[in-house]
Image (cartoon, rainbow, N blue to C red):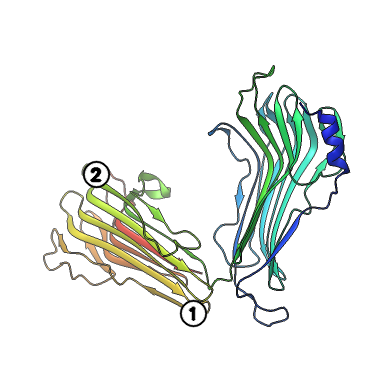
Amino acid sequence: MTNPSKTLRVAVMATATLALSTVTALGATPAGAATVPHFSYQGSGYGTTAQVGTVVTSGRSALTTLGCTDEAGVHHANSAAGVNLAPLLTSGTVRVTTDSLASPVRSHTTATTQRVNLLNGLVRGDAVKAVSTTAYQSGRFAVSAVGTNVVNLMVAGVSITAVPAPNTRINLAGIGYLILNQQTSTMTATSASLTVNALHLYVTTTNSLGIAPNTSVIVSSASSGLTGPVAGVLDGHSYGSSVSGLGNIVNAGRSFPETMPCLGTGGITRTNSGASVAISGVFSNQTVADTVRGTVTATSASGETTSTVQSAYVLSSLVHATGIKADAHASTNGSSFAFSDTGSRFATLTIRGFAAVNANVAPNSRLFVAGVGTLYLHRVIRTANSIEVRMIELILTSPVNGLPIGTDIRVAVAEASAH
């Protein structure tokens, strides 16, 4: 087995300059041109996580994500107290930040963990920091881990005074091994990303500490990424039904939901479907199918979400509909936006006490049902960047069948947005 001290000395002697990779972007704007490309930013980070095989024993502390955005100037931060999984892992406070920035265009993530102690002190440090940056400048992508740092790190009794070269391995006798400054990057003509794990411990053998083999621990993880140029990014979702109360109390979650990825689906329809959902006296649905489909390019971004319910009853027979479909469309060319509910429909529709209402009901129809509440049919909600279609929505203004005032029942919902 490799001597840890010998391996460590070689690592410290290696250059501390962190890797920088670049690639020319497809269709990139030439250096000096006035047009600034539009990009999708990605970023996430956390303090610590531990798992045995595929079973997570400690989740990602202070997890922070940039979310789905193509806007510069977004800043998210999170912090958390330490964890105590002795003898495997203990740590102090964690601080994580993610940012989307301009001039140059870049995604930047930092994750710092204080007072790190692994394996009963075999690995310990005052602070461990991971930094990941993905940038686009002068028509090229670049990734960098500059800023990654360790303070007073000791491994098997040997001090590490400088950040070692990327992916430096230190063998730990009777335990496994440790990777310092672990880096994983991707680079294509239209995207780049980098993940930096400041420390990654692998337990590979039975040991005196009683830690199960196939255990791994990551300390301070930072990821960043860019994709583009793109005309915009997408968002949205669809689901068959839900029941919620005042204060966002969920009585029945969204059935068979499907979510639109930030960069679409490559034009492929993704479907989540099921046979039926029912709550006695509240609603029952038969055969639900929810879909999303989207395409993002340098010149356009378009998405469609749908929810189709074969048959639905709400409050027993108050509302009965068949062939229900919510259909939401969103698109942009990078400067203007378009939204539509084309395709939304009922095959049949009957409302007890409202004989004149049928499947041809106009969008945003609203009925006041005495002793029950407000019933919306083919409800369309628009914002500057989104459209949401709720084919049936009933909000109770009186208690009914054990449901309190404020209960919100929805059937066939589709939302699509472009940014």
In percent of width and height, residue 315 lies at 20, 50
Q: Is residue 147 left or right of residue 109?
A: right
Q: Amino acid at mark 1?
A: Ser
In percent of width and height, residue 395 lies at 30, 56
In percent of width and height, residue 332 lies at 47, 75
Q: Amino acid at mark 2?
A: Ala
Residue 91 visible (yes or no): no
- Picture residue at 32% right of the left edge, 50% below the top: 405
Mark number displayed over residue 278: 2
Q: Is residue 146 left or right of residue 312?
A: right
Q: Residue furthest left?
A: 355
Which is in the foreground here, disc 1 or disc 2?
1
Q: Are marks 1 and 2 in contact (CB under 8 Å)?
A: no
Q: Secondary structure at mark 1?
A: loop
Q: Secondary structure at mark 2?
A: strand
Residue 155, compared with residue 280, is above or below; it is above
Q: Is residue 43 left or right of residue 358?
A: right
- Give the image quarter of residue 410: bottom left
Residue 177, compared with residue 413, is above or below; it is above
Q: Is residue 318 left or right of residue 187?
A: left
Query: Is tag 1's residue or tag 2's residue first in the polypeptide sequence?
Result: 2
Residue 212 visible (yes or no): yes
- Residue denoted by label 1: 336
